[in-house]
Amino acid sequence: MTSLFPALADGAAGARPALRFGSRSLTYAQLAAAAGAVAERVRHAGRVAVWATPVLETAVGVVGALLAGVPVVPLNPKSGEKELAHILGDSAPAVVLAAPGDELPAGLGGLERVDVDVSGVGGVPAEDAGDEAPALIVYTSGTTGPPKGAVIPRRAIAATLDALADAWQWTGEDVLVQGLPLFHVHGLVLGILGPLRRGGSVRHLGRFSTEGVAAELNGGATMLFGVPTMYHRIAEALPGEPELVKALSGARLLVSGSAALPVHDHERITAATGRRVIERYGMTETLMNTSVRADGEARAGTVGVPLPGVELRLVEEDGSPVTAYDGETVGEIQVRGRNLFTEYLNRADATAAAFTADGWFRTGDMAVRDPDGYVRIVGRKATDLIKSGGYKIGAGEIENALLEHPGVREAAVTGEPDPDLGERIVAWIVPTDGERPPTLEELAGHVARRLAPHKRPRVLHHLDVLPRNDMGKIMKRALGRG
């Protein structure tokens, strides 16, 4: 039986800072008291929903429920009525935790509301829930139907955070700055529970800004977690913000995740600061699978090597393992380990379909692997694998090549049916100069010179903006793929 938060029961950590959101903060002693009070209120609830706004109360509410051994269902405050109704009907929480004063939608009206008091006083209960007991039920994006609730057990959280501590040399001395949503694994598990498990602290920006990042890193923070959209904004701002250059140059660790960080942004950040952004790879269902290590080579465009305790393999379409780790052969990633979820709530059919007979989880992500074990994601099987002219082509490497063209600000690549090739490559770009966008011929030649002729786009669309979700991922189905 593993405690998720040993520092909360450790009196020696009492005066250490634990959480800070803007000007509001809690020490470990204050967090223990406030979370203990929440735990007392919800300990007999079957499940609790948390209205996951980026505020101190969300973090306290989640920690309190986990101390009580009660599974948490984080709710996206931007969820539409239909999606919210599905999640509540599927997970059936008894209580909703919220910050005082938060206006909740009518769909939550049938639940008992508990306002989280960050000055509350309660004792820290013993964490007596077993390792396999559910900790979180996190709903997937629902791109192929209604969102599915991934049941994440306590051992998966502990295993992932301890593996990342090993890979990133993460200790209680680290101070993390982030501005991520708290209803996703990235912002909540890595960005809140991660520092608390180590006995360190987190400073949440509330709303991401380059000025906020600079202030926190220059004010003693050691680590930054972000998504590619954030790092793109950082790369754009660096030439005009010397304090931001100083901040990133002095950071111990810069981590990007939730989608691939374009190589062009990697290079701009490194050129300006001398620091490399490292990437890791995970999913709601698996938490974290791989990462570039703090003591390893930060190779732009890769997500590093499997984390301790994680088995990873690539498989062909027929399920047979890929044997050529040559940096070119594309296969689907499958993983096994203590980091995995246990099931999709109320979806035995989907759970069974997600696993092989011998327990490997089918991620649906396509990748290549270098001879030294580094993994490079090339895209999702459903939306990013293009079969053209007998080749299996990952959209990601074409997107990176397009972003190296000075006339391209943003890029996405999809495939569409072609009577001769099977599928043809389609580029969707936001031009740097809308008055003089690059032509198809220009971009096709650019890609062919950098990659290979069969990877050049055959169709080009110019857009004002690419559709993205809350985590900055491009929603390719909105572009007409799938």
Image (cartoon, rainbow, N blue to C red):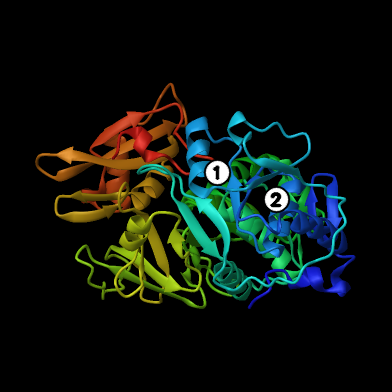
Question: What is the number of the mark on residue 183?
Answer: none
Which residue occupies 67% across, 69% down?
Answer: 4
The residue carrying pointer 2 sits among few (fewer than 14), some (14 to 19) or many (20 or more) residues within 10 Å by Cα, namely: many
**How many marks can you see?**
2
User: How far across and down, in percent of the image, does residue 403 sit?
Assistant: 43, 43
Question: What is the number of the mark on residue 245?
Answer: 2
* Residue 86, visible in the rendered structure: yes
The three-letter amino acid code for the residue at tag 2 is Val
Circle 1 sits in a helix, a strand or a loop, which is it?
A: helix
The residue carrying pointer 1 sits among few (fewer than 14), some (14 to 19) or many (20 or more) residues within 10 Å by Cα, namely: some
Circle 2 sits in a helix, a strand or a loop, which is it?
A: helix
Which residue occupies 47% across, 67% down?
Answer: 340
Decide if residue 419 is on the left or right side of residue 238: left
Question: What is the number of the mark on residue 229?
Answer: 1
Which residue occupies 48% across, 46% down?
Answer: 90
- Which quadrant would the C terminus be assigned to in this image? top left
Q: Nearer the viewer, residue 442 or 395?
A: 395
Decide if residue 301 is on the left or right side of residue 250: left
* Residue 246, visible in the rendered structure: no
**In this picture, is 12 found above or below 78?**
below
Q: Residue furthest right?
A: 15
**In this picture, is 430 found above or below 260?**
above
User: How far across and down, in percent of the image, does residue 72 sit?
Assistant: 61, 54
The three-letter amino acid code for the residue at tag 1 is Thr
User: How far across and down, in percent of the image, does residue 251 sit?
Assistant: 71, 60
Q: Nearer the viewer, residue 356 or 220?
A: 356
Callout in the foreground (2, 1): 1
* Res 168 → quadrant: bottom right
